[in-house]
Image: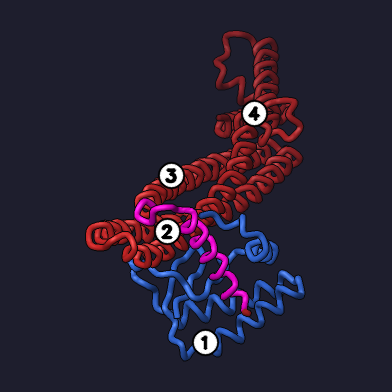
Amino acid sequence: MGILQRMSMIFRAKADRALDRAEDPRETLDYSYKKQLELLQKVRRGVADVATSRKRIEVQISQLSGQGTKLQDQAQRALSLGREDLAREALTRRSGLETQIIDLQTQHSALQGEEEKLTLAAQRLQAKVEAFRTRKETIKASYTAAEAQTRIGEAFTGISEEMSDVGMAVQRAEDKTAAMQARAGAIDELLASGALEDPTGIAKDDITAELDRLASTSDVELELSRMKQELTAGPAEPPRQIEGQAQPTGDPLATPQSQPQQDEGRP
Amino acid sequence: MIVRIMGEGQLEVDDSRMRELNSLDDALGGAMESGDDERFRRALMALLDAVRARGTPLADDVLVDSDLVLPYAEAHIDEVREMLSDEGLIPG
């Protein structure tokens, strides 16, 4: 016997066993209907859960993208300060983020697919539950207990297979969502701790710290050379002229045009 | 002939297509026995494609049990084995 037929027999055996357990077939109808409504609720909750996970991943993708942009800016700022090593570090971290973003995008589309499937499953189940309810009322109203039995069997096996299938689909969706939520939780923690910016976890965003340090060092140097100029040229001279005279000293940190560049990249 | 694709719903497939489906089903059985998930996956995809292409989806409000049931597309060979052996896996 083929696999497909064996599969269908397993579903049918489930339905038959449930039907056999019932003492009064008519009660089976009401009991099954109650179970159907419960399952319908469960599927709808499942759709909502998957949607929540999907949205959470969307937020994470945009947060990680923001980090990526920030690292790109830092790399540019570091390069303009002549620190290629820092720029390289920033770009390396950015490429690590890219990998994570791609991974999240894969998860996102998987969840989207799951959400669509479950939404359709909920629609199908709702239509079947409604059909079952109509049939249940007809059977209860128009047949004797004995006559009702066969008709109940027909209605019951039809819905039972659907319920088993949908029940398993919801379970699969829940398992997938739970696995992804665990990973999403880990990324949230990383984002919150700032460790994504600093793999060593020692300092928060060490690249920014280093860039700020570089900028303030050159501020100090600039101020010092300005003071030195004042001492040699005398206090009566206006600062504009002093800065102009600073250039021939050959100190690159004292050049006035480097100052605005350093300030631009600061957050 | 009513065919269910787990997780997707039921379709009606004309009886004239049974020979084709049976040979694809045999290939799936062979793949299951071999234990090779790759081969199982190819056989399952071929079956799913055939049923989706030849079948007409049943209306949502039709209550009827299926003659054949196909595992869901992402099913792993071990999951299908378990479904066939361990009846506890299917709720109801």
Residue shown at 40% from the left, 61% from the top:
A156
> Label 4: which residue?
A193
Q: Nearer the viewer, mark 1 or mark 3?
A: 1
Q: CA distance from mark 4 to mark 1?
A: 60 Å
> Label 1: which residue?
B18
> Label 3: which residue?
A45
Label 4 close to label 1 by CB (< 8 Å): no
Residue A118 placement, left or right of A190: left
Q: Chain of mark 4?
A: A
- The kind of secondary structure the magenta stretch mainly shows is helix
Give the colour in which the image draws chain A: red
Labels 4 and 3: the sequence-earlier one: 3
> In which quadrant is the N terminus of chain B drawn?
bottom left
Three-letter residue code for mark 3: Arg
Q: Nearer the viewer, mark 4 or mark 1?
A: 1
Three-letter residue code for mark 4: Ser
Three-letter residue code for mark 2: Ala
How is this picture coloured?
by chain
Residue A187 in picture, x, y percent from top left: 62, 38
